[in-house]
Image (tube, rainbow, N blue to C red):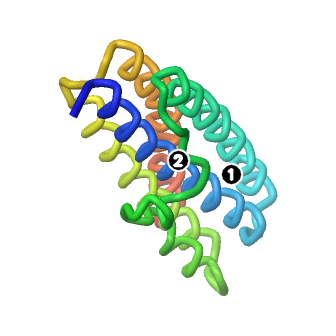
Amino acid sequence: MTTITKDVSILNSLIATLLDSIDGYQKSAGDIENKALADKFTARARERQSAVTKLQAAVASAGGNPEDDGTLLAGAHRAFISLKEAVSGKDDKAIVAEIERGEDHLKEKFEKALADTDLSPAGRAAADEAWQSVRAGHDEMSALKHSMGA
């Protein structure tokens, strides 16, 4: 597998999982009772969309076809599927706990991708920039979960 093909494959996998996280945040924002948390989830979804747009540009620059749907089409693990199923009838703590679990999966996926020594410098730079959003989101949701005793 060439470096460019590997870049496209890895970055598209990250895009698909980020798209899942956007869906999870948007669904949670609509289901959670706490307005401040809903606003936080909406802001995180917007930030993730920005990261997706940049990764899609990197895939296109590498000559690939950028992913534009979640992992259901990509065939990968659907990190936020349990969130979509769990929020119905759950309290705010349960929603935050599900989001944090999805963030853990996303963090692991990015750490694995960034450990791949075959990524090109451009691919690594794009993944690293998106990683900043992922790490911040993970840390924020983890702190929020623990502050709520979830």
Disc 1 + disc 2, Cβ < 8 Å: no
Q: Quadrant of residue 60?
A: top right
Q: Name the residue tied to disc 2.
A: 18
Height in image: 5 above or below 84?
A: above
- Rendered location of residue 83, percent (x, y): 54, 71
SS label for mark 2? helix
Height in image: 98 above or below 54?
A: below
- Rendered location of residue 67, percent (x, y): 54, 46
- Rendered location of residue 131, percent (x, y): 44, 31
What residue is at 43 percent from the left and 62 percent from the top? Answer: 79
Tag 2: Cα neighbours inside 10 Å, few (<14), some, or many (≥20)?
many
Q: Residue furthest bottom?
A: 89
Circle 1 or circle 2, nearest the eye: 2
> Mark number for residue 2?
none
Height in image: 103 above or below 11?
A: below
Left or right: 64, with 115 as reference point: right
Tell me the CA gap for discs 1 and 2. 14 Å
Q: Residue furthest left?
A: 117
Q: Residue furthest top?
A: 121
Height in image: 131 above or below 12?
A: above
Q: Quadrant of residue 86?
A: bottom right
How many discs appear? 2
Q: Amino acid at mark 2?
A: Leu
What residue is at 68 percent from the left and 51 percent from the top? Answer: 41
What residue is at 77 percent from the left and 67 percent from the top? Answer: 30
Tag 1: Cα neighbours inside 10 Å, few (<14), some, or many (≥20)?
many
Compare residues 64 and 24 and report the one nearer the observer.
64
- Rendered location of residue 73, percent (x, y): 50, 63
Compare residues 1 and 118 and report the one nearer the observer.
1
Sequence-first disc among 1 and 2: 2
Q: Amino acid at mark 1?
A: Phe
Q: Name the residue tied to disc 1.
A: 41
